[in-house]
Image (spheres, rainbow, N blue to C red):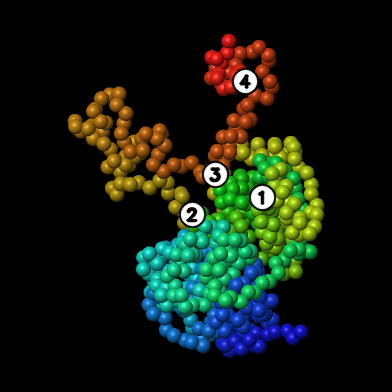
Amino acid sequence: MTTKTFESFGLNKALLQALTAEGYTTPTPIQAQAIPDVMLGKDLLGIAQTGTGKTAAFALPILHRLAENRVAPAPRTTRTLILSPTRELASQIADSFKAYGRHLGFKVAVVFGGVKYGPQERALQGGLDVLVATPGRLLDHMQQKTIDLSSTEIFVLDEADQMLDLGFVKPIRQIVARIPAKRQNLFFSATMPTEIGKLAGELLKDPVKVQVTPQSTTVQRISQSIVHVEQGRKRALLTEMFADPEYTRCLVFTKTKHGADKVAAYLEAGGVQAGAIHGNKSQPQRERTLAAFKAGKLRVLVATDIAARGIDVDGVSHVVNFELPFVPEAYVHRIGRTARAGKDGTAVSFVAGDEMKLLRDIEKVTRQKIPATDRRNDKALGLLDQSIMASGVASKASMPDDGRGDRQQRGPRNPRRDGVKSEHGGQPHRVRKSRDGSGARGGGEGQRDRTHHNDRGDRSVASTQPFDPLAADRARSAANAQRPQAPRPEGQAKPDGEFKRRPRGRRPSNGGKGYAAKG
């Protein structure tokens, strides 16, 4: 079998020059199968996971086709549209197009949420050859008429299964309805659920199907282990693990965004530098957190599966599955973040009682029995959890210095321009005046002061209390700690205010006529 090369595809010389500079030598399987058909303008259905080289599989032939038919794009239009589920993945795709087409002079832009509209509108104003976008922000631009898709020639839908998980199928249909029917469609997905198969059938016309067999077995250099532990003590176990200096750069996966924030705050309370990244974070927050993790300022990055898409960080020593994923293939993708570039890695998974079925599915897919240890009913973890929850208010996840740290030292902002502070700590212009000119309505002595914010007690306009995402958990932990453990002696009266349950009588079996019918 003859090994294919990029030169054998007949790609534009400027593309081959860029590939040489990027260090590309041999096409990956999906590139070898997809590039020739995409160059011919055929629709394509690609089933492949992230990390198989599929970005180059569609970027190279698209750039080649644009170069063969070079046309100046009209203002606020794009010749190529690529939809991506996450901001990070969209940025990576745009960077790949810029790198591969560095000698072609094409206009490439990326639009996504979490950032200001102004720079994106200016980028769209002059017209684009390639636009990479997330569905939500693209719809916003379409509604504001800052982008026109009537001249789009090539449409790419990447990570379609993740689009389904994020609820983007309806927005995708709205976007596709604005694109000309005569176009080339490229459709990529790691899996093919029923809804995604239906969407592919709507978009594609006589597609060429390219499928790369997913990696079903895990990398041999990854040491995998399972720890059986109660759900409520997973955070304490995670904090305990970081007493080991071998945990230098760790990636922790959670199922939910709120859970990621709470795990990161808990680690910070336990003295471990941690940050969280998920879809609710703004783009600058995500970029600063990721930069801090890459620079070694954060020891732990807590992320959801969706937010982790497109994140490529070298030197990850450990991957911790704080919660097992619902899809077994996601487990393989998670732990593949470690043991890169020929290095060894470690993957640890915490398994609660209700996650045993997920564990069995993972072991079936990976074709191995993962060694396990049991930390259930471990009193040491319970004591550690109590000490961390009682350690005081946690701080926000660590961030690199962005030049705004001195803002926190200036205290609350005074709303008055003349610098005079209100006597009550509120805003004087919001005081409701009565008919006699006094600050209280009706002027009575017993009347409540109506100064703005005063109904909130003694708290000032800007609260000086530190951020505490674990406030509810701390209150619950304190209440549990104060709960008496010894049983109440028989015959002792219940304390005042305690709920007294009325004994339930047995329902009579008289055809549903009730107690009144008895007798």
Tag shown at residue 323: 1
- Dot in front, 2 or 4: 4
CB-based contact (under 8 Å), mark 2 and mark 4? no
In terms of sequence position, does the residue under pointer 3 or pointer 2 come before the other? 2
CB-based contact (under 8 Å), mark 3 and mark 1? no
Residue for badge 3: 469
Figure quadrant of residue 433:
top left
Please state the horizontal and vertical placement of residue 307, each as a whole percent of the image. 57, 59
Q: Relative to 115, is 16 on the left or the right?
A: right
Please state the horizontal and vertical placement of residue 15, each as a whole percent of the image. 58, 85
Residue for badge 4: 509
> Callout 4, which amino acid?
Ser
Residue for badge 2: 405
- Dot in front, 4 or 1: 4
Instruction: State the residue at coordinates (66%, 72%).
Output: 211
Q: Is residue 31 above or below residue 163?
A: below
Pointer 2: residues within 10 angstroms few (<14), some, or many (20+)?
few
Instruction: State the residue at coordinates (39%, 80%).
Output: 74
> Callout 3, which amino acid?
Pro
In terms of sequence position, does the residue under pointer 1 or pointer 2 come before the other? 1
In terms of sequence position, does the residue under pointer 3 or pointer 1 come before the other? 1
Query: The residue tagged with tag 4: helix, strand or loop?
Result: loop
